[in-house]
Image (cartoon, rainbow, N blue to C red):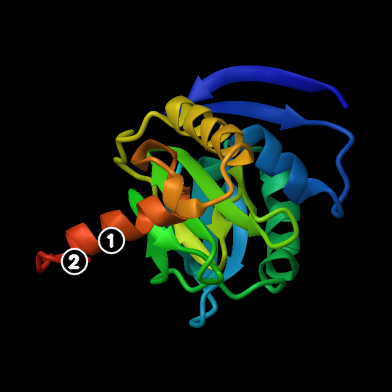
Amino acid sequence: MEIEEKKEMRGYEKTTLTDETDKDIISRIKEKSNWTPLGHTKELEYVFYRDGEVFTIDPDRFTTTKMQIFFGITEDEAKKVKKALPIEASKMEVDVKNTIGNGVYKGSNDKEFIIVNGANVIKAEYDSITHKYKITKETTPIVDGKLLDLKGNKEWLNTDKLFEAQENIIEARKNIIDENELPPEVKTLQEQFKLIRDTVSCWSWEAP
């Protein structure tokens, strides 16, 4: 695939995509413009995601001209996108009200949780076989059914220290049989989360 860069227009870098087909036009647009189509709302609006922000657009008002401005593409490409978008959007209904920003959230069960730290999202999953937590960085806009709204978020957690601390916890637990012997600095993330939750629950928050 050959990509020819053109001059910038109205704040967007206009590009020409060659050798595209109707089948792969959406993935090509996503790659070049950084706009990710997530699906549709209950009201049948398109849902897009870019740079941590959620956008909803009425399909009836999303003309080819607006697509050219929105994606920075040619008229022919916009016509192909307009034809392909309804099928792409039909794949998933998105609840745009179920969003999370900076903070710590419960995952799909009591032994999983999600940390939103600025533009970084970390998921901690408990392995019932090894009885250890696996910490991974998430790159998808939807985690455990929750839509990430990262606009304006600032980092509040040193994630490098978090990963380092978890490794230290694992090493410390190898040499201790009685859990009661564990010093505070090697408590698991789940135990630390419970302590934080108990502490912040002492206040009544305007926006929980």
Pick the front one: 135 or 32: 135
Image point (78%, 47%), residue name: 25
What amino acid type is highlighted by mark number 2? Answer: Ser
Image point (72%, 29%), residue name: 16
Q: Tell me the tag on residue 1.
A: none
Instruction: Find residue 43 and report its horizontal and vertical position in percent.
Output: 48, 82
Direction from residue 113 to residue 130 in the image, left or right: right
User: Mark 2 to mark 1: distance in Å?
Assistant: 6 Å
What amino acid type is highlighted by mark number 1? Answer: Arg
Q: What SS does tag 1 mark? A: helix
Instruction: Find residue 130 and report its horizontal and vertical position in percent.
Output: 72, 53
From the image, tell me which residue sits under label 1. Answer: 197
Contact between marks 2 and 1 (CB within 8 A): the answer is yes
Instruction: Find residue 203 and report its horizontal and vertical position in percent.
Output: 10, 64
Residue 138 makes an appearance in the image: no
From the image, tell me which residue sits under label 2. Answer: 201
Of the 4 image quadrants, the one containing the N terminus is: top right
